[in-house]
Image (cartoon, rainbow, N blue to C red):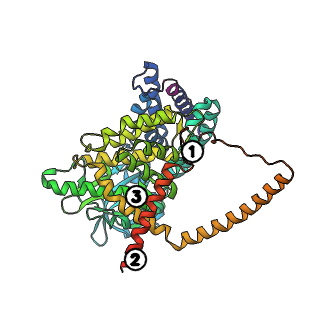
Amino acid sequence: MAPSRTRAIAELAVALTADSISARRNDDGAEAGPSSHRKRAVRTRLLMEQLGPFYIKLGQVLATRPDFMSGVMMDELAHLQDRVTAQPFAVFEPVLNEELNGDWRRCFASIDTGRPLGSASLAQAYRVTLRSGEPAVLKVQRPGIRARVLADMAAAGRAARLASRVSPPRVNAIVDMSTTLGVVFDAMQPELDFTVEAGTMEQARRAARSFRHVSVPDVLMATPRLIVQSMAPGVSIRDADLTRFSQQRCTEIGRDLLAFMYHGYYIERMFHADPHPGNIFIDPGYGATVIDWGMVGRLDRTLSAMTMLTVTNMAMNDARGASQGWIQMGHATQWADIGGFTDDMERMLPRLVSSSLGESNFGVALLAVLRSAARRGIRSSPMVALLGKSFANAEGSVRCIAPGLVIADVLKDVIVDVLIELARELLSSEQACRFAMDTMLNAMVTGDQGRGMLRDITNREFAIKVGLLPGSAMPNSAGSLLPAGTAALAGLALLGSWRVYRGQRGR
């Protein structure tokens, strides 16, 4: 890596660390700051733009992290755009020939080389005509960009480890920068290998079949450095002429878009991480098409279920349930003020429950919760920021055509499908095998522990310690050994299981 680039990365790490420390010293969430803070924020944004695609994506994620960044820095990083000046087709033609064994002309009748559809730091897109006469979109990676991004990821990881050594313990306890970087690394994988993006699009396209007004482009060809997709009908949802759509049509498209995103979070556990208006095309006859699946997030089963429970509690104005669910997605530090965090939730949630998209901003509310959690000594899941970014963008896209939609109403419609899917998983043969294995292993461990306890009692070495572990998510006044979120989730799963059982009995 060139010395100048290494210095730029080191300067960026210092700037981000300094901002994080200053944000913790002034943790009231104030947006204003000294001119020196604003200059540092501007310099940070310029460094990220100079360093290229990985750092631009990282900056976009950090712009949603009030638990880590100051308000001044977040405002500045929000201006990061992954748009670059289009380069001549001659720059990309060698990549095209290498991926297509020497002659791209045998695959395409024509390529509109003079007017790229889009130009980003990782790839450039063109309108093409296939030999069959069908219009399509070709996306080609920039030469050498994958190796550069992987080198940047390695350098950023080293810088994060060094920064954690000089950060105050309380900053490190609230934010794990290495884990946050890992989330960005994983989210960018489809952009580094278009065959991965093609697989992601296939999964999303199958999911979209459940929604009348949402679709995903077909993948017509994919290699690691190029992908050909069907053309999305219509225009960006931001630029659409709404006089061509009835109000009912706008509402149907908006509702299906939100439901499709919820389906990704809670059922597919794979979601579009950047559904901004430029990635949503709409047409009166075809509905919405979700394009550019280069940045995606993935959730494990537990985090997905806890996220569903937390967001459902938020939408239903249950501050205590929402605060406990949020804590269980992350963890409480030894100095956590759980009661204060619940109080914060009680102040924030009532404004969201009945508000439409035009009256409130649920994505912004999630950021406010993230800021409150950090201030109260609660470490949030590193995936929350990517989820918040995804949902805020989806919400902004839907607001363009259906500002009257109420998020809580859409969530209520989706939650039954989520419960049924969870029930099917609980009743699957895979889960039965897992339960049997867990039971056998627990029996073996319990037997060993029992023999150890008898030995200790015999030797008069047996003692019992009573108390909560440091960082427990349970309030001091808790009267139950089972966290409320876990109990509620179990109840929801049992409800879904009963619905499936009754359905099977009725057939």
Numbered badge on residue 179: 1
Q: Which residue type does callout 3 highlight?
A: Gly
Closest to the observer, 503 or 462 = 462
Res. 323 in view:
yes
Q: Secondary structure at mark 3?
A: helix
Res. 113 in view:
no
Res 466 → quadrant: top right
Residue where numbered disc 3 is placed: 264
Per the model, the C-alpha gap separating discs 3 and 2 is: 26 Å
Instruction: Give how far across and how far down residue 172 sits, in percent.
Output: 59, 35
463 over 372 or under it: above or below: below
- Which residue occupies the extreme right position in the image? 459
Q: Which residue type does callout 2 highlight?
A: Gln
The part of the chain drawn in magenta is 22-26
Q: Secondary structure at mark 1?
A: helix
Q: Earlier in the sequence, mark 3 or mark 2?
A: 3
Res 389 → quadrant: top left
Q: Earlier in the sequence, mark 1 or mark 3?
A: 1
Asked if the magenta segment contains residue 25, the reply would be: yes
| Residue located 84% across and 56% down the image | 455
Asked if the magenta segment contains residue 68, the reply would be: no
Instruction: Give how far across and how far down residue 366 sits, in percent.
Output: 40, 41
Determine the main secondary structure of the stretch shown in magenta.
helix
* Contact between labelled residues 2 and 3, with CB atoms less than 8 Å apart: no
* Contact between labelled residues 2 and 1, with CB atoms less than 8 Å apart: no
Q: 474 left or right of 415?
A: right
Residue where numbered disc 2 is placed: 504
Instruction: Give how far across and how far down residue 231 sits, in percent.
Output: 29, 62
Q: Earlier in the sequence, mark 1 or mark 2?
A: 1
